[in-house]
Image (cartoon, rainbow, N blue to C red):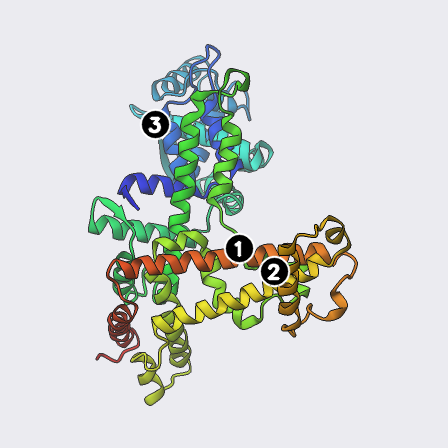
Amino acid sequence: MSLEIERAASLVLEAGQSGELRAALQAVADSTTPNGAAHYPTKVCRRLNRLVVCRAYAVSVLQLCHLINAADSCAPRRGAYEHLLLGPERATGSGFRGWIQNAVTNRGWRRPGCELTADGVAVRYDDGVFNVGFAGMPVLAALFEFLCGTIGYAAVDDEFHTMLEPPITDRGIRSAANGIERRLYAYLKEHLPSVQMQGKFQELLDYARSESKTLVVEDATVLAFWREKSLNGETGNFRLFRSVFDAYMAFLSALEIATDREAVERARSIGSDRDAGEVDVALLLDDAEAAALWTSPLSTLQEPPFENVRFLNKVDLTALDRLMEHGPRVHRLPWSLLRAEVFGDVQARLSQAARRRDTGDTLSELIACTGAETYREWHDRLVVLDERVNNALRAALHVALQADDAAERASEDERLEEARDVAKRAFAGISRKGFEDAVVGERGSGVVYEVGAGALAAISDQIHAFLRVLKQSVGEGTDLDDQFAYDHDVFSKQFARIYGVER
C-alpha cells in the first residue's frame, strides 16, 4: 500500500467514526442560512472534524464556556446565549464581531466583567481574565451545534445554567467545561476507536513521516518499526512484535474502510434514480462497508449454539486464531504473520520468564530462540491442520445431510452418495463432543451443523489462500529456510537488547 502520508492520516482519522458520529458532523456541515448558503465555512467544518476525531477539543470547550458567558452578558435576556451562537447569519468572525458590537451598543453589558477588544472579547473574573477572539467564534458555534446534536441540548444547557449562576468565576467556567468534556468523552468512546488505538496509529504515521513522504506498509516496514520502537518504553506498547503486527493490521483495516467509503461517497453525483439507470449510492455505501469488514469464521464456532459442538479442539483454534482474525488482509504481510506466530510465541514465553525473573540457561535459550519452530515446520503444520479442518467439515456435513429436511431435498445422484460415504467415514473417525452417534438425525441439528460446516469451509479457504501467498513469495525468490535463518538472527539479537543481554 502506497499513499501520501497526510492523506493517509486524514483517512485513518475518519475510518473509525461510527455512522451516527459521521451523521452528526455532516449535519453541522449541511446547516444553511435562510437564503440557502452554507452556515459554516468549509474550513470551520474541517476544524471541527479534527477537534472531534482527534479528541483535541478540551481548549475549544473551555473557550466555548467563556464565550457563553460573554453571550449571556449581552443577550436580550438572561440565559438567551443561543441568540449569538445559533443566529441565522453565516458564521464568520466579522459576523460575530458585528452581532456583539450591535448588542453592546443597543443594550450594553448586563453585568460587569466583559469588554470588547480589537480582536474579540475579554472576560474578567475575580480569579482571572480570558480572551475569546472573533476569528475563533465560528468554530465554537459549530462545536456548540455539534454538542447539541450528540450529547444533547439539555445536557449542555444544564452545565451552562449552573455555570452562569452568580457569582460567575473562572473556576466555575472550568468546572462546566470539565463536565461537558466528560459527557463528550463518554459519547466518543462509543463512536470512535479507543484512545490507545488512535495513539498507536499516530505512532505508525509519525514513523512513516520520518522515513518518507509516502506511506508504505510492507513486511520490512513492520520489522523495522518493531526493531526501533521495542526499545522505547515511552511510545505505545510496542515491545512485543505481535502488538506491532496487530497494530499494523488494524491500521490497514482503517485505511481500507476509509478509502472504500470515500470512493463511494464521491459517486453521489451519479444519483439514486434507478429508473433513469442511476446507481443507488446509499446501498453501495452499505455494501462497501460490509465488504471491507472481515469476521473470523472461528467466532461462529465459538458462539451459541455452535460452541456446544467441538468442531475443532482448543489447540487447533489457538493455532488458527491470528490467521483467521485478520483474514485476507494478512496476505499483504505474509512474513509478518510468520514472525508473529513463530517468534511471537518465543517472545511470549520470554516475557513470562522475565516477569518471573528467571536467569541462567532458560532465559539465555529463549533469547537465542533455541528450538524455535521453523517457518517450514509452521507451514507443514498448517497443511496438516487444514486436513483436520476438512475432516471436521466432512463430519459436520454428515450430520447435516441426515437431517429430515436435507433428506427430503436430496437427489439420488451417485456423486452425492459418494460424498455421503466420505462424510460418514469422517464422522466415525472423530471422537469429540457433538460428534456422537446420538446427534445424527436429532431434531434441529441440521442447521447447527450446516452453519458449522460453512464456517469450516471458510477457514479452509483462508488457509489455502495464505498458503498460495507463501508459495508465490517463495517463487519470487524468498525461501522459507533462508528467511527463517535471517529472522532467527534478527529476533535473537533484538531479544538480547530488549531483555538486557547483548549478544
Pointer 2 or 3: first along the chain: 3
Rendered-image quadrant of the C terminus: bottom left
Instruction: Tell me, yes or no, if residue 74 can be seen here.
Output: no
- Vertical comparison of 365 with 14: above or below: below
Closer to viewer: mark 2 or mark 3: 2
Pointer 1 or 2: first along the chain: 2
Q: Position of residue 8 (x, y in %)?
A: 32, 42
What is the secondary structure assignment of the residue under circle 2? Answer: helix
Q: Nearer the viewer, residue 284 or 137?
A: 284
* Point 42% across, 78% down: residue: 352
User: Residue 301 shows which numbered tag?
Assistant: 2
Q: Which residue is mark 3?
A: 43
Q: Position of residue 50 (x, y in %)?
A: 38, 37
Q: Nearer the viewer, residue 475 or 470?
A: 475
Is residue 312 shown left or right of residue 212?
Answer: right
- Vertical comparison of 355 with 437: above or below: below
Q: Nearer the viewer, residue 90 or 291?
A: 291
Pointer 3 or 1: first along the chain: 3
Is residue 98 shown left or right of residue 321?
Answer: left
* Point 38% across, 54% down: residue: 331
The disc labelled 2 sits on which kind of residue?
A: Leu
**Disc 2 and disc 3: Cα gap in Å?**
48 Å
The disc labelled 1 sits on which kind of residue?
A: Ala
The disc labelled 3 sits on which kind of residue?
A: Lys
Instruction: Tell me, yes or no, if residue 348 can be seen here.
Output: yes
Q: Which residue is mark 1?
A: 458
